[in-house]
Amino acid sequence: MITIDKGFPIPQQGTKGRHPKWQILFTEMQVGDSVLITTGQAIALTKAAKVLGGNVRQSSRDCENGFTRVWRIS
């Protein structure tokens, strides 16, 4: 038997998958904006952008070791 639960909050729109904080960051960025984050975080942000139908570009040139700059391009 399936139990119907009442009173559970509905998740925010635009958050799909396991890492909604990266999706929220992506939606707050405008085209041309960039962030300096770790390489691992850049991978998570790239995946979030794809889930939301957007696109980013990243480069570690001129960044400290282990960091990457990520731009929103669409």
Image (cartoon, rainbow, N blue to C red):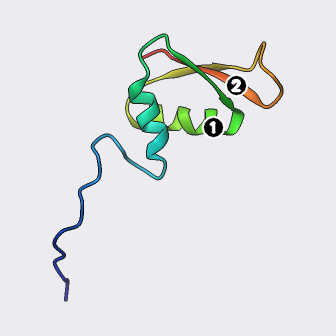
Which residue in the rendered view is the most extreme toward the right?
A: 65
26 in relation to 10, above or below: above
Residue 28 seen anywhere in this rendered image of the structure: yes
Residue 50 seen anywhere in this rendered image of the structure: no
Q: How crowded is mark 2: few (under 14 residues within 10 Å), some or many (20 or more)?
A: many
Q: How crowded is mark 1: few (under 14 residues within 10 Å), some or many (20 or more)?
A: some
Q: From the image, tell me which residue sits under label 2.
A: 68
Q: Is mark 1 in CB contact (under 8 Å) with mark 2?
A: yes
Q: In which quarter of the image is residue 23?
A: top left
Q: Residue visible at 78% across and 13% down?
A: 62
**Amino acid type, mark 2:** Thr
Please name whichever residue, 41 or 1, is drawn nearer the observer in this view of the structure: 41
Q: Residue visible at 24% across and 60% down?
A: 9
Image coordinates of residue 12 in percent, x first then y, are 29, 46
Image coordinates of residue 66 in percent, x first then y, are 79, 31
Q: Residue visible at 38% across and 34% down?
A: 52
Say which mark, if any, is on residue 41: 1
Image coordinates of residue 20 in percent, x first then y, are 43, 45
**Amino acid type, mark 1:** Gln
Q: Say how many tags the image has.
A: 2
Q: What element carries label 1?
A: helix
Which quarter shows the C terminus? top left
Q: Determine the CA span between mark 1 and mark 2.
A: 9 Å
